[in-house]
Image (tube, helix red, strand yellow):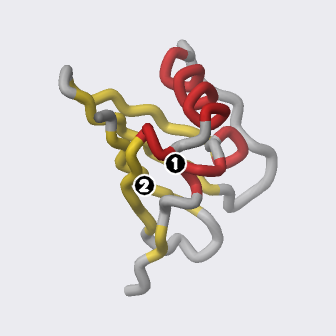
């Protein structure tokens, strides 16, 4: 089963946040959006504005891992919900 490790960086406070989720638990729409993001070649468009989040998403599969860095406006909702903040 494919598993995602998600790290959120940035934002105003810069609090560390991360989480893990099984790909199978995502909605079909979120899985399709995720596949498109992993297949995308070249830089992804940044969201306008300051202090925006960036998500580092690593897919762990039986054949290895693959990582993509995403601006917050492109992160599927099911993946964003997997992230929990850790207070220092």
Q: 41 above or below 59?
A: above
Residue 53 spot, x, y in % from top left:
61, 56
Determine whether 52 is above or below 69 in the image: below
Name the quadrant containing residue 76.
Answer: top right
The residue drawn where x is 65% and y is 50% is: 77
The reply to whether dot 2 and dot 1 touch (C-beta < 8 Å) is yes
Q: Name the residue under label 1.
A: 55
Q: Residues within 10 Å of mark 2 (few under 14, many from 20)?
A: many
Residue at 53%, 43% in the rendered image: 26
Residue 62 spot, x, y in % from top left? 19, 26
Q: Which residue is drawn at 49% across and 59% down?
A: 82
Q: Which residue is drawn at 45% across and 32% down?
A: 68
Q: Which residue is denoted by mark 2 in the rendering? A: 7
Residue 29 vs residue 40, the one in the foreground: 29
Of residues 40 and 52, the one nearer the viewer is: 40
Chain-order first, disc 2 or disc 1: 2
Q: In this view, does 7 lie above or below 24?
A: below
Q: Which of the two residues, 9 or 66, is positioned nearer the viewer here?
A: 66
Residue ranking furthest to the bottom: 88
Secondary-structure class at tag 1? strand
Quadrant position of the C terminus in the picture: bottom left
Q: Distance between the residues labelled 2 and 1?
A: 6 Å
């Amino acid at each position: 089963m494919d598993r995602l490790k998600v790290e959120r960086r940035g934002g105003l406070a810069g609090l560390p946040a991360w989480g893990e989720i099984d790909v199978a638990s995502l909605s079909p729409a979120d899985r399709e959006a995720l596949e498109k993001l992993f297949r995308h070649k070249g830089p992804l468009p940044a969201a306008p504005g300051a202090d925006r989040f960036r998500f580092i998403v690593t897919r762990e599969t039986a054949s290895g891992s693959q990582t993509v860095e995403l601006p917050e406006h492109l992160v599927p909702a099911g993946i964003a919900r997997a992230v929990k903040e850790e207070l220092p």
